[in-house]
Amino acid sequence: MESKNYDFGGLTAVYTVVDGAVSLTVIPASRRRSLRAEKLDLSAVRRKFADAMPQSVFQIALRGDVYSRGLGMGMNNSSSCGAFCPTGQEYVAEEDGAAVVTRFDAGAGLKGVHTLRYKNGVDAFESFCEVYNGSESAVVIERLDSFSVSNLSPFEVENDSDSLVLHYMRSHWSGEGRLVSQTLTELSLEDSWSLYGARAFGIGQTGSMPANGYLPFMAVEDKANGLTYAVSVECPASWRIDARHSGGHLSLCGGGADYASGHFALQLNPGESYKTNSAFITAADGGLLAASGRLIDYYSTRIDAPAREQELPIIYNEYCYSWGAPSIEKLRPLMNAVAGYGVDYFVTDAGWYRDDKKEWYSVGDWNINGRLFPDGFNGLVREVESRGMSAGIWFEFESVSVDSEAYAALNDCLLRRDGHIIRAGQRAFLDFRKDKVREYLTKKVIKPLKEAGIGYIKVDYNETAGIGADGASSPGEGLRGHINCVLDFFGEIKRAVPGIVIEICSSGGMRLEPKFLSLAAQASFSDAHECPESAVIAGNLHRYMPPRQMQIWAALKKEYSLLKTGFVTGTAMLGRYCLSGDIPALSVEQKDLVRQSVEFYRLIRGVIRDGDTVFISQEGVTSYKRLRGSQTLLRAAKDGKTAVLYAFNFDGTSRRVEVPNLDLYAVSAAFGGGAAELDGSAVRYAPSAEKHGCKIFFLTKNAGAERVR
């Protein structure tokens, strides 16, 4: 095949063939004429380093491979990459877009395919690879990437490592999405004096909590040329993304874990095929938010949610009220109180199933406590619906506690590694590859949801199963197969209970990855419910996921001042507004403020649902535990006519933050306090004796309202 460029909307996919290897580079379509051919075909670097290697778009490694020398190449560009030779490429028109399909053949019946798919109206690509074993013997795959992009920067013959910035996001429990930005120089991602040797930096995680350690996202900002590349991967289990600098250029590649990073090896028998999960790739003029926003737009097209979710209904979750000890007697006055705030979903959280002799966190049997709920699920649903709300319920159905009846009854259906039951504390994990497990959960989960008419399920997951499980050709493949069956069970819930709203939770935000997000209407953003850093975490995630899915709790307490009450409810407005806490005990003034917040949220929800986050400043924010500084965030409607500006002051000190194009807007409405005012093109934070102030402005562009001053 010949080197070729394909234009899709605002993007161009650049395919280059060197030494029989096909490389892929993605750029904004407006930059095509700036491409440096001598960078793409390696001719420039080969004048200095004849052994410079191209980066194949089809990154595969089979057991027994010979690996490339390079002091850092690892499993990259193994001998199988060279064996899978390109045989053709075709442009395929599709109903809602188009795709470029590149085919490879390694002989003896082994074939590979890389697909790059574009969806009309969204400037991002979906990428995945497949391999088919048409030979007469089994092969063992130890790596198959979902994506590989290379030749960065394609606009410079020689990279300036000081002007290329790598962005990635650290993620921990109650600390999700912390942005880290480092130059290639700081990461040592630059060529050696002789150009020999690969320099590598990777992120990822091993286990069943995908966002535990890092979010599956990476971006490269080319400050010299004013554009940013961004990638992410579907990864319901172990995953990795690698940045490598070798032979004059930077490449990004990744997908599910390989043998080196996640104990993954898959035996592919004759006649079998294997397809990776998808990755997502984009490039955009501008900085990080410009590129990440395109990926978020792509994720938004994949959300499988009921039509009623379009209006971003308000949620109340009772966990920060009963703290794992709900009963119908406790919940009745609570339902009466929250119904007056326009709440749409009333969710009963953990503890409804607890045995009187056990703690609330003993899970697995899923029998509603008849003493606490004498009329069972049907009675609970009737009580909720009689007050004009839909009933939701909490489950953690992938785990069983060692003191549960299910642990004994399903002991032969628990995940094992090296023959031993995998345990995390008092929890063990059901093996969803077993028919007996799915039958049990159909009875215990799906049946009550359907029979009682429960319209909302919060699915939690509070431990990781670790590196993998028995029952497959490797521990990593065992984990992958199990998680795929978990995803299938989510599909069974949707088929059995049409229109159900699914909330993904995993100790808060530990399952914030594209595959799980595509299954859910909402996702818990974090477990940081009663601390001021929740506003920073929510702001972080605006760089990563659709705010319309990001459920943020306003966990209220009677001892909060009005300023703190406004701060807590204002934080929830960064995404999906979820009330919690002791609503009945609030003062009259607090209750009035909460009602105002709900009304204001309804005013701005269209921008939350469909807009773009175009500016984030977290000035002075370093430690979350000892939070200081401010957060200023601007989210604008797609048509630019309206916008929402969030201003959080975490330490009560004065500062002035410039916001691009802010002076083009007028204030239409505002909520909250905290001594934040707009001053031309800036937010001015005035000193305050009380910390943790929040003010939110609904802005209209050139609408004839009072000009921003």
Image: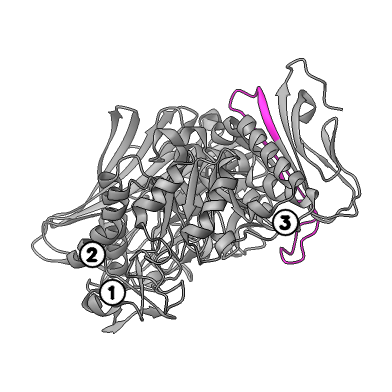
Residue occupying the point 57% across, 58% down: 526
Secondary structure state at the residue bearing disc 1: helix
133 left or right of 258?
left
Q: Earlier in the sequence, mark 1 or mark 3?
A: 1
> Which of labels 2 and 3 is toward the front?
3
The image quadrant of residue 475 is bottom left
391 left or right of 161?
left
> Which of labels 1 and 3 is toward the front?
3
Give me the C-alpha separation between circle 1 and circle 2: 9 Å
Q: Earlier in the sequence, mark 1 or mark 2?
A: 1
Q: Nearer the viewer, residue 374 or 278?
A: 374
Kind of residue at disc 2: Tyr
Q: Answer whether residue 198 is magenta in the image.
A: no
Kind of residue at disc 1: Ala
**Is mark 2 in CB contact (under 8 Å) with mark 3?**
no
**Residue 231 visible to an observer of this rendering:** yes
The image quadrant of residue 611 is top right
Residue occupying the point 43% across, 34% down: 308
> Mark number for residue 406?
1
Q: Earlier in the sequence, mark 2 or mark 3?
A: 2
Span shown in magenta: 616-644
